[in-house]
Image (cartoon, grey):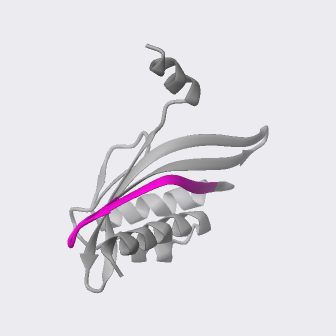
């Protein structure tokens, strides 16, 4: 299997772990490298396996009825690093209906043993569609 396919598979496992709120599955996605980095939207960077896993555990406890669907997935891989970018569409059920937000994510993976592991997840809010349309008129 070429590295692009391996990176896409582990990227899918990452989002599956999120949607299932499965901390054990999330542990399997992340690498043990102490330089691993995670940037959740609006958070300072988290460095290292345990701070990152603790953040996911907290998110899972507090995310309630949230689901992520990914789109615009792009993969670039070499022998020792894979880069995956995508748009995350977050759906949250709230008292006043379903809230939809959009985040752009970049995920980096590296080989660890026979598997690929996440080295970095960086997510940041995307501007609203109207803002993108307005900017293109300038």
- Is 32 drawn above or below residue 45 in the view shown? below
Residue that sits furthest to the right in the current view = 96
> How many marks can you see?
0
Front-most of residues 27 and 131? 131
Residue that sits furthest to the bottom in the current view = 114
Residue 44 location, quadrant: top left
Q: Position of residue 100 (x, y in %)?
A: 65, 42
Name the residue: 39% across, 43% down. 43
Is 77 displayed left or right of 8 in the figure?
left
Name the residue: 49% across, 76% down. 25
Name the residue: 20% across, 71% down. 80
Span colored in magenta: 67-83
Q: Magenta includes 14?
A: no
Q: Position of residue 115 (x, y in %)?
A: 33, 81
Front-most of residues 26 and 110? 110
Q: Position of residue 92 (x, y in %)?
A: 67, 48
Q: Quadrant of the N terminus?
A: bottom left
- Is 15 drawn above or below residue 85 in the view shown? below
- Secondary structure mostly seen in the magenta stretch: strand
Q: Position of residue 16 (x, y in %)?
A: 55, 68
Front-most of residues 19 and 73? 73
Name the residue: 52% across, 18% down. 134
- Is 30 drawn above or below residue 39 in the view shown? below
Q: Quadrant of the C terminus?
A: top left
Residue 84 location, quadrant: bottom left
């Amino acid at each position: 299997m070429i590295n692009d396919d391996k990176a896409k598979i582990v990227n899918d496992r990452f989002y599956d772990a999120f949607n299932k709120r499965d901390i054990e599955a999330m542990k399997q996605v992340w690498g043990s490298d102490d330089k691993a980095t995670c940037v959740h939207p609006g958070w300072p960077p988290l460095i290292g396996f345990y701070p990152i896993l603790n953040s996911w555990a907290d998110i899972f406890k507090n995310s309630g009825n949230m689901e992520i669907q990914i789109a615009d997935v792009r993969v670039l891989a070499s022998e020792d690093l894979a880069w995956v970018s995508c748009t995350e569409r977050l759906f949250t059920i709230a008292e006043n209906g379903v809230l939809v937000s959009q985040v752009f994510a970049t995920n980096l993976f590296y080989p660890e043993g026979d598997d690929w592991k996440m080295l970095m997840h960086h997510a940041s809010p995307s501007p609203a569609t109207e803002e993108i349309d307005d900017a293109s008129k300038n």
